[in-house]
Amino acid sequence: MENERQKFKKEFKTRIYKWVLRLVRMVDGIEKSASGQVIGKQLLRSGTSILANYVEAESASSKKDFTNFFNYSLKSANESKVWLSLVKDTKKAEQNEVEWLLKELIEISKVIAASILTLKGKR
């Protein structure tokens, strides 16, 4: 039987995965202008990196390595917020979807940041 911590980790990974799926669909719908293509590629790169680094942390060889992957994940989340904000402000995609993605990303970022503080013993 899974304990609460394991259950939370599994559900959080699923939450990030579902967020990335919605991000990919949204990016595919961004207008195909020169700026839309650049912003879309950057957003896709940084957004998928959140999940990739979170998953990579699961097989970290040390606590320091584990913490580093969480740091990379948070940095990618922060970068993704910038690109999503640009998509929103330039109206290059459906606004309700972009707003949902931003709101959910802020929540995901808070969980990752809190985890980093806990790992560093500052919480």
Image (cartoon, rainbow, N blue to C red):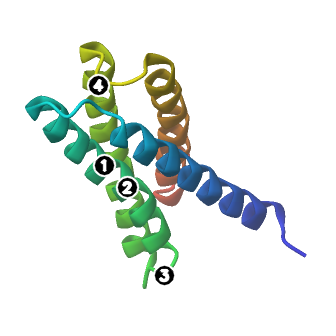
Q: Is residue 108 above or below residue 82?
A: below
Q: Circle 1 is placed at which residue position?
A: 44
Q: Circle 3 is placed at which residue position?
A: 59
Asked whether the residues under the numbered discs 2 and 1 touch, taking CB atoms below 8 Å apart as contact, a structural biologist would say: yes
The crowding category of the residue bearing disc 4, from other C-alpha atoms within 10 Å (few below 14, some 14 to 19, many at least 20), is: many
Q: CA distance from mark 3 to mark 1?
A: 24 Å
Mark 1: amino acid: Leu
Task: Please give the name of the residue rendered at 14% of the width and 40% of the height, measured from the top-left corner.
Answer: 38
| Left or right side of 16 for 40 | left
Q: Residue 107's quadrant in the figure?
A: top right
In the rendered structure, which disc, 3 or 2, sits on the residue that comes first in sequence?
A: 2
Q: Residue 82's quadrant in the figure?
A: top left
In this view, the mark in front (4 or 3): 4
In this view, the mark in front (3 or 1): 1
Tell me where residue 12 appears, x and y as whole percent.
Answer: 64, 54
- The dot on residue 48 is 2
Task: Please give the name of the residue rendered at 66% of the width and 61% of the height, measured from the top-left corner.
Answer: 9
Q: Is residue 36 above or below residue 18?
A: above
Q: CA distance from mark 3 to mark 2?
A: 18 Å
Residue 76 shows in the view: yes
In the rendered structure, which disc, 3 or 1, sits on the residue that comes first in sequence?
A: 1
| Left or right side of 42 for 6 | right
In the rendered structure, which disc, 4 or 3, sits on the residue that comes first in sequence?
A: 3
Mark 4: amino acid: Val
Q: Circle 4 is placed at which residue position?
A: 87
